Amino acid sequence: MNARRHSSGLTLIELLVTLTVAAVLLGIAIPSYKFILVTNRLASTANDFVVGIRQAQAEAVRRNAPTQFCSNVADTNGADDLGASCGTSAGAVYVLNSDGTRTKIYTAPNVPADLSLSASGAGVTALRFTGQGLAQAVGGSGPYTGLVADIYTSELSDSNHRCVYLTTGSLVSSCTYTSASEGCPADEPASCQ
């Protein structure tokens, strides 16, 4: 009698087919994973800036004292004591105490290496909040309306800007801007919520 041998294991063809399928799946998954990581870093950094603005506003009202949301460009922070505290700590928040001292109430967000603040080089807008909770641009007058921060990455070909806006000195919003070739518009688009 001829007994058939049953072997357990994979043939060379089965192994090659399995490796090919795995390589195709990895080739599809890795770019998607990178896209998710970068968009999450953009959103997280923008949210950190929104939190900083809201913190500056809340502390100004709570303490009935000026607070400042800092720019990454030292010259735009102002030359007074409160502005000089900022240095280039974009998103940090300082308060001017009643005795004239300054206290940091919010630490500048950590901006990942693959992100930059403002593709145009203008930097983050420095905002000064009054005890009523209204912000104006440092050196400006009246409630500020416009772009506060353009958080940008060159790792993506589109939807690579996260824009943070302030309206009438008090309402903060953040949205994704889809143009790869230009930065966030100075005025908040209607589609930004």
Image (cartoon, grey):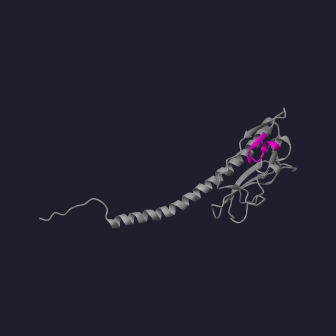
Q: Is residue 13 left or right of residue 58?
A: left
The answer to whether residue 193 is visible is no
Residue 25 is left or right of residue 74, and the answer is left
Q: Quadrant of the C terminus?
A: bottom right
Magenta stretch contains residue 85: yes
Q: Looking at the picture, tell me which residue is in the foreground, 166 or 67.
A: 67
Residue 135 in percent (x, y) is at 81, 47
Q: Residue furthest left?
A: 1
Instruction: Tell me the quarter of the picture where residue 92 sits.
Output: top right
Where residue 69 sits, quadrant-wise, is top right
Who's the residue at 71% across and 48% down the image? 50
The answer to which quarter of the image holds residue 80 is top right
Q: Position of residue 138 (x, y in %)?
A: 84, 48
Left or right: residue 55 versus residue 82 is left
Query: Is residue 10 located in the magenta-colored stretch of the structure?
Result: no
Quarter of the picture holding the N terminus = bottom left
Query: What segment carries the magenta color?
Result: 83-94
Of the pair 192 and 18, the residue shown nearer to us: 18
